[in-house]
Amino acid sequence: MRFEERLNNGARELLLDDVKRRISQTWSEIDHPRPTEPELTAETKSVLSTQLPETGWGDRITLEVASKVLDQSLAQSRPRFLAYIGSSGLEIGAVADFLAASYDFNLAIDSKAASLLEQQTARWLGQFVGFHNAEGLFTSGGTVSNLTALAAARQRVDPDARKLGNSKKLTVYCSVESHYSNTRAVELLGLGSNSMRAIGVDGNRRMRTDLLRAQIQQDLADGFTPMAIIATAGTTLTGAVDPMSQIADLADEFGVWLHVDGAYGAPAAGTLTGAALFAGIDRAHSVTIDAHKWMFVPKACSVLLVQDLSVLQSTFGHDEAYMPHDTQAANPVDLTLEYSRPLRALKLWMALAAFGAEGFRAALESNLDLAQYCYSIASSRGNFRVLDNRPQLSVVPIQLQHADSAKTSKLNQLLTEAVVQDGRFFLSEAQIDGETWLRPCFTNFRTTREDVDDLFEVLEEVAKSINL
Ligand SMILES: Cc1ncc(COP(=O)(O)O)c(C=O)c1O
């Protein structure tokens, strides 16, 4: 098919009708669990190993084939996908992506209303989580948001580093359970991962501030310059929320940048149940929130909120011949790591506008409730073990016990594999204190208490097929 042929309006309408039918079917299927995951068929594998077609297949056939491929892929939006920290593909967000892609904005430059919308969405999100007066911008994920925040933190303590490289012995503090993306950022900034100080955690798996203080004091005595403290607001492993007020006190005392990695957990700050855990979030210099995790919109939609955008300008600002500054105002690309940026904010803006803070609060509360429910069921069954303390957010590690405790880890590893093979649920495993656990995560508004009840039935049933 030639590009001129796509101009045919009739063909466009037909294609849109077809897309509409398929999307509507997908959405109604995704709302409910399916009895098993479909096979990845030999036919699909064969299509996916063909050479580049010289003559195109045309829109209709291509759409047909793509639909089959998508159906045989692993979609995290299904209600019984409880592995990792999944996402939900909220419909209005998917629609927003389609619209934004149709215009194909580039937020590297001031895109008029689209740029205002990006700024407003960041402010809305700040209001939702209690990080008031926040400004912000959208990135491709928590990894890039964390890197951006740490680059800004470095700019603050070592302003010549952009030109001269790191001239100081910088250190960064986080809990032992912080996400690896932070270490990756430190590696990329040329600090070396040895500059990361992994601080021990308490019985709730939150960063211990007594150890944090001692480590900062030791480092100062040894001639290091503390660059940033990263408080995790919802660890990936167990959903622990570091004590942000106490950490902010130390950040103030030692004059260190406080970054909150709330990629997963920060949305819970907007709920009645969760808010208290996040006290102090408004004292951070920067906060990462992945809207594609627990604000339910499709990937990729991460937000970096900051107290003051000008620090990003000093971190990333530049004046190149192909991007001159016609006015005093910076181009958005002077504030971001990325050049070409799609209008990622539209999906969150449309979702927030459509459901309001109230709608989001209710969906988040429901996930928090499922986590407590899952913990209660596991604790009440004699053969499951749970962590000593109830879940702070929506990650609930559980462990099926073997009569011979030395075999419990192996049992849970085999159980995860068997459940995935079974196809009714999708779970992932986690290593906690050297042992293997199952780690259901509740971040999908479609998941219900009935799903949690069935999870335990399926686990018991599937476990019977394991010989260990
Ligand atoms: C706490 C935390 N920070 C950062 C990330 C990285 O986010 P992304 O996968 O969007 O890059 C994750 C991912 O799970 C996370 O849980």
Image (cartoon, rainbow, N blue to C red):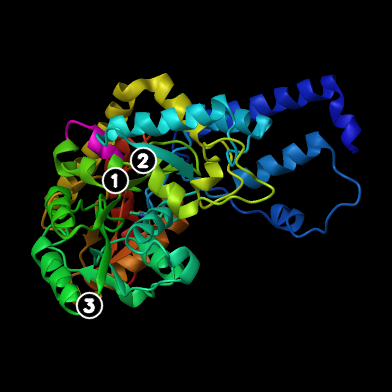
Image quarter of residue 119: top left
Q: Position of residue 182 (x, y in %)?
A: 36, 62
Check disc 2 and give the amino acid type: Trp
Check disc 1 and give the amino acid type: Gly
To which residue does mark 1 refer?
265
Residue at the image position 47 percent from the left and 64 percent from the top:
162
To which residue does mark 3 refer?
223
Q: Position of residue 301 (x, y in %)?
A: 47, 41
Residue 467 sits inside the magenta stretch: no
Query: Does the rendering let one see residue 464?
Result: no
**Nearer the observer, disc 3 or disc 1?**
3
For numbered disc 1, what is the local secondary structure? loop
Task: Please tell me whether residue 428 is drawn above or below residue 410 in the rendered image.
Answer: above
For numbered disc 2, what is the local secondary structure? helix
What's the magenta region?
267-273
Image quarter of residue 60: top right
Of callouts 1 and 2, the N-terminal one: 1
State left or right for residue 203 relative to residue 355: left
Q: Is mark 1 within 8 Å of ligand 1?
A: yes
